[in-house]
Amino acid sequence: MTSPADQRAGADSPVELNPDELSLDELSLDRLTADVSVFQRKRGHRFSSDDVITAWVAMQVCPAPERVLDLGCGLGSVLLHLAWSVPAAQLVGVEVQDVSFALLQRNVAHNRLGERIAIHHGDFRDPALQQHLQAEGLFPLVTGTPPYFPHGTATHADDEQRTRARVETRGGIEAYLATGARLLADDGWLVVCGDADAEPRLRAAADAEGLTVRARYVVIPREYRPPLFTVWALRRAHHRHTCVDHVLTLRDEHGERTADAKMLRAFSGFPEAADANETLRRPSAPR
């Protein structure tokens, strides 16, 4: 089901990309899950815990979606994790950066997921692309991992790919919620992550788009440290219920993996996390 890379509104360059243009010397091949590996640039943007936790939260609130949309999917870490987690789902990913889209193409092909994943090279804010995505119906699950920092509030990295992954050069969490709301099924879930300080912006954007926060997962990098980021699960406002709060702590005060971290490893299918099976649970997922 892989679509041609012709949805290019707002993309970096009008030139058709060949994913093989990236030299293997620049790349590493890393395991995302027990069965999925991704190419990523050694000195570029790389997947991290926020991608895995976004996929995990999505599976807590919407464990068996028939269709999934991942906005600004980068090299494909959330998209591919969800494809592995839900083998029956059809998935769609949108990415605007040339370099990241080239990696996305390579990663979908490398994992032989082209029959289930359609990818589009373009800006998800573009109305024409949104209309194209709506043509086959709305999505029961929409995910996104926006950049954390508003333009002008963070130092740009030397690498353009890394800068655009962390700084809002094409809109921030508001743009993800606006597009997600337009493409979300009436009974669907929208799952996004963001900087822990972005709560007021997230709430304001949700109100503007007729969404309500149903669950919030605050992620602590190490015990007694400030929150690192938050993942929110939203639904349309007429599904109003009390927001359920959770805290995930990744390292204890001595720097060792916590039960939460082992649970996330188990979620990705890694054998070394087998002793975390007892913590691989669905923590009172909201409905």
Image (cartoon, rainbow, N blue to C red):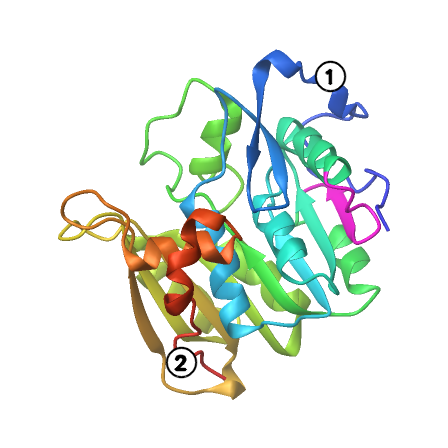
Q: In percent of the image, x 41 and y 46: which residue is there?
A: 49
Report the span colored magenta. Answer: 111-123
The residue carrying pointer 1 sits among few (fewer than 14), some (14 to 19) or many (20 or more) residues within 10 Å by Cα, namely few
Of labels 1 and 2, the one closer to you: 2
Task: State the image coordinates of residue 286 (x, y, percent, origin top left).
Answer: 45, 81
Q: Is residue 281 left or right of residue 97?
A: left
Q: In percent of the image, x 60 and y 12: which residue is there?
A: 25
Q: Is residue 135 left or right of residue 146?
A: right
Query: What residue is shown with label 2?
Result: 284
Asked if residue 113 lies in the magenta stretch, the reply is yes
* Depth check, front residue: 20 or 38: 38
Where is residue 163, by image quadrant? top left
Query: What residue is shown with label 1?
Result: 21
Asked if residue 50 lies in the magenta stretch, the reply is no
| Residue 231, placed above or below residue 93 | below
Where is residue 255, by image quadrant? top left
Q: In percent of the image, x 60 and y 68: which residue is there?
A: 181
Task: State the image coordinates of residue 122 (x, y, percent, origin top left).
Answer: 71, 41
The residue carrying pointer 2 sits among few (fewer than 14), some (14 to 19) or many (20 or more) residues within 10 Å by Cα, namely few
| Residue 249, placed above or below residue 122 | below
From mark 1 to mark 2, how far is it between C-alphas?
46 Å
| Residue 95, placed above or below residue 90 | above
Q: What secondary structure predominates along the stretch shown in magenta?
A: loop
Q: Which amino acid, by three-letter code, is at mark 1? A: Glu
Asked whether residue 144 is in view, the answer is: yes
| Residue 208, placed above or below residue 22 | below
In what element is the residue under mark 2? loop
Q: Which amino acid, by three-letter code, is at mark 2? A: Ser
